[in-house]
Image (cartoon, helix red, strand yellow):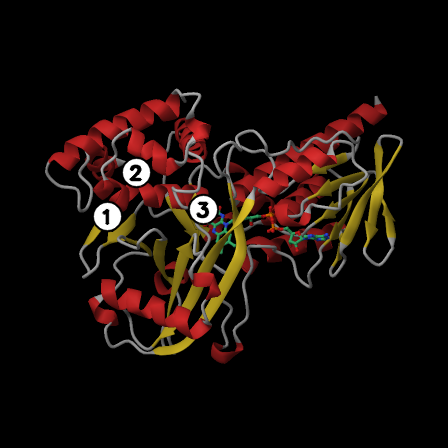
Amino acid sequence: MHCVIVGGGLAGLASAVWLTEAGHRVTLLERRGSLGGRTIAMPVAAVDDVPDNGQHVFASGYEHLMRYLDSVGTRQYVEFPGQMTIRMPGGATRRSAFAGIAGARAALGDLPGVTGLDRLRTMRAQTTLIRHVLRQPDWLDDITADEWFRRIGMPQSARDALWDGIVIGLTGDKPEISSAKVPADLLVTGIRQARKTRTPISIGYPTVDLDTLFIDGAQKVFADNGVEVRHRAVAASIDVADGAVAGVTLTDGEHIAADAVICAVPVWNIRGLLDKVPGHEQIYAAAEQLTPVPIVSVNLYLDRPIGMTDWGEILLGGEGVLEQVWDRQRMHGRNPQRAHLYSTTVSAAYDLTTKSNAAITDIQMQMLRRYFPEATDAQVIHSHVVRMPKSTFAQRPGTAGIRPDQRTAVRGLALAGDWTRTDWTTTMEGACQSAARAVEVILQSSKGDRG
Ligand SMILES: Cc1cc2nc3c(=O)[nH]c(=O)nc-3n(C[C@H](O)[C@H](O)[C@H](O)COP(=O)(O)OP(=O)(O)OC[C@H]3O[C@@H](n4cnc5c(N)ncnc54)[C@H](O)[C@@H]3O)c2cc1C
């Protein structure tokens, strides 16, 4: 088959690689001048460096993403150290882990800043929470995560110490916005994966930049197998004839004929592409409800080390946003001779995105000085601010089940992308799982055609 993939983010890349592995001819169309979508490295001339558009961390259950890394030969560039560090203003730290002694202490309500009777209340609320996660009450998608925590009596101190951060980390959005069902479903997925692989849940990170991790290996696969990659090729519509896919028309009017198409554009670019596909109204209506969430990342090149004790640290007390800082020296083995690179991530950064680069840098430096005594006199050599207003999407109450399936009403046409239906939310794993399912739909449809 000649398969056309629309969109060169992780979902499109994985689809292209796996259809190539299955022996099909592939053309990959990407709107921009480079591949990678939301996972890219960005050259910064001022410091002659190529940092990422934002830190991407891995969960131990990311099996489809790992399969993609195996396909492109870069799995060795991901490490799972088994723990992160939680830091309080002033500099006090504590190891965080989901297993072992740290996990057991957390289960008993022994969390940073949780004292006295609140420990007992936390333990009780966590027991109810796990019960709700495993046997979900039917009202879970009617309420926000914030309301859920209040309903089960989770003390504010435990929310500040752990649970609000978990919701933002898992869903990408604030507990006051996200449906309670989204973190609950993700916890189920995490528990299921941990049981399947018999390894405790942990968080990992790439030891190289995102282009080296995701793109270079894919480009080699494409070059070796004759995959045609077309940059600045913007799809305008997916074409359909007699109930089967016929190809893709670009915005400049060119028609590319295809036996199969995987449409792997992000949720905010789907409108208009599927106008000829029966059932497109429902897909567009679902897309409208998955609203974008901003992330602001800053690559801070400093004149000295700030005293991080771990590769990644979660800063508690961030007033409704999840603030994290990453030590690129430890993670990438960087030589800090010219500058020490620390990357910060602010998720659900609704307020920060509208500020100037100088203001954002200032806010991030004030934050580092609040948490790291050694940062008090640190000077910024260069600051690289990356604002991504459309980083991930929010799933509000009442949206359970709206994400569309990879299979469409049109033979030979499948959808992929982190927003289509998967066991995950808006993640790299969601993108790769959607690709695996989309490829399966295409391979089955080709068998149907033959048989
Ligand atoms: C700053 C940041 C931090 C993140 N952190 C994490 C994390 O720690 N862990 C995690 O798992 N996930 C994280 N994510 C989410 C993760 O990056 C995404 O879920 C995933 O990369 C989405 O991949 P995708 O292929 O579905 O979409 P995209 O990467 O958006 O790719 C879609 C591609 O389609 C192209 N396109 C759009 N329209 C057209 C058209 N008409 N024709 C041709 N091409 C088109 C786009 O240009 C784009 O390249 C983060 C995201 C951001 C932005």
Circle 1 sits in a helix, a strand or a loop, which is it? strand
**Residue at image point 41% right, 22% down:** 136
Task: Return the residue at label 2.
Answer: 98
Task: Return the residue at label 1.
Answer: 95
| Label located before the other in sequence (3 or 2) | 2
Q: Which mark is residue 121?
A: none
**Residue at image point 39% right, 20% down:** 135
Nearer the observer: mark 3 or 2; the answer is 3
Q: 382 or 334, which lies in front?
A: 382
Residue 73, percent across and down? 57, 49
Q: Amino acid at mark 1?
A: Arg
Q: Dividing the picture into quarters, in which one does residue 278 lie?
A: top right
Q: Amino acid at mark 3?
A: Gly
Task: Return the residue at label 3.
Answer: 172
Residue 166, percent across and down? 35, 42
Q: 449 or 161, which lies in front?
A: 161
| Label located before the other in sequence (3 or 1) | 1
Of all residues, the one furthest to the left in this rendering is: 116
